[in-house]
Amino acid sequence: MKDEVIRVEDLRFSYNEEREILKGINLKIFSGEKIAVLGNNGSGKTTFFMNLNGVYLFDSGRIYLREREIGKKKEDLNYLRKKIGIVFQNPDNQIIGATVFDELSFGLINLGLDKKEVLSRIEEIAEKMDLKKYLDTPSHYLSGGEKKRLCIADIVAMKPDIFIFDEPTAELDQFNIRILEDILDGLKKENKTILLSTHDIDFAFKFADRVVIFSDGNIIGDGTPKEIFSNDELLKKANLKKPIVFEIYEELVRKNIIKPQEILPKDIEELKKLI
């Protein structure tokens, strides 16, 4: 039986009680899932993430974290934020430390960790995220990609149960994307639950074991990558394209060059092995 970690029921949110952004979201998330959340700008993805982490307070509905209902009391929100870490789309909205070291240590100190553990985690994550040479650097001197790496390092070092990445590949070049992929692979091996929004369909296809599609404040699709990307009508409605690898895979199956696979090839190398 799957271990449910988050349950959202009829979640609604509006800005200034005027324009409703989330229009009754229902979603169950299970331990260890890797979920790609897709949809155009303005579809409600980021707003949903902000509600899940307690940055925004929903108008109505319910959020359960491991069967604990999360209300709007301080103790509920502190519990939520400790268990769910979020990497914002815009790094400047997240970074508050004067230097890279200050930024990495801030959240760890707030967790109540002792100095030795704080320094150990900073050293470990700085090595993984190629930030060791920047530890004494003022945060505002970093490039956009370096700031994004720092934000990711921030949350990974805190070791929450659930990770939310809002457009983590934005502003990242191929070098930085490879670092991100290594971090995600490590979190997968630890069986962490991950929600990730992105406009990079190929990245989402490679990463996810489940895809959720938002449109105009509603969820209009929820299924495996094969179920979602085989549904041409759904993709048209959501204005999404098919991943390149999946499109090639479908064509090869149609031409009887390869047989249909239970486990889909996620990248070109895996596809080559089938041919």
Image (cartoon, rainbow, N blue to C red):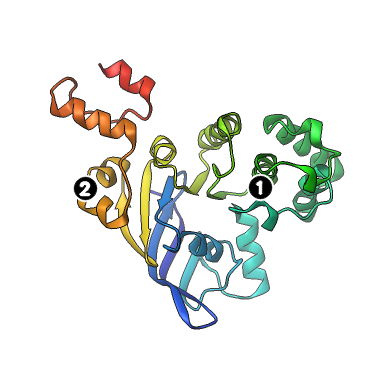
Q: Residue furthest bottom?
A: 17
Q: Secondary structure at mark 2?
A: helix
Q: Residue at x 39, y 67 (%)?
A: 217
**Which quadrant would the C terminus be assigned to in this image?**
top left
Which of the two discs, 2 and 1, sits closer to the camera? 2
Figure quadrant of residue 174: top right
Left or right: where 226 falls relative to 176 = left
- Examine the rendered structure and indicate whether residue 245 appears above or below residue 215: above
Left or right: where 250 falls relative to 69 = left
Question: Tag 2: residue type?
Answer: Asp
Q: Residue at x 30, y 41 (%)?
A: 242
Whole-percent x, y for residue 82 in the image: 65, 57
Left or right: where 234 falls relative to 266 = left
Question: Tag 1: residue type?
Answer: Ile
Q: According to the image, label 2 marks what residue?
A: 232
Callout 1 crowding tier (Cα within 10 Å): few <14, some 14–19, many ≥20: many
Whole-percent x, y for residue 87 in the image: 61, 51
- Whether label 2 touches label 1, CB < 8 Å: no
Residue 54 seen in the current view: yes
Disc 2 to disc 1, C-alpha distance? 36 Å
**N-terminal-most mark, 2 or 1:** 1
- State the residue in front, 6 or 54: 54
Callout 2 crowding tier (Cα within 10 Å): few <14, some 14–19, many ≥20: few
Figure quadrant of residue 261: top left
Disc number placed over residue 155 in the picture, else none: 1
Whole-percent x, y for residue 23 in the image: 39, 73
Q: Residue at x 53, y 48 (%)?
A: 167
- Examine the rendered structure and indicate whether residue 5 appears above or below residue 72: above
Whole-percent x, y for residue 218 in the image: 36, 66
Q: Secondary structure at mark 1?
A: helix
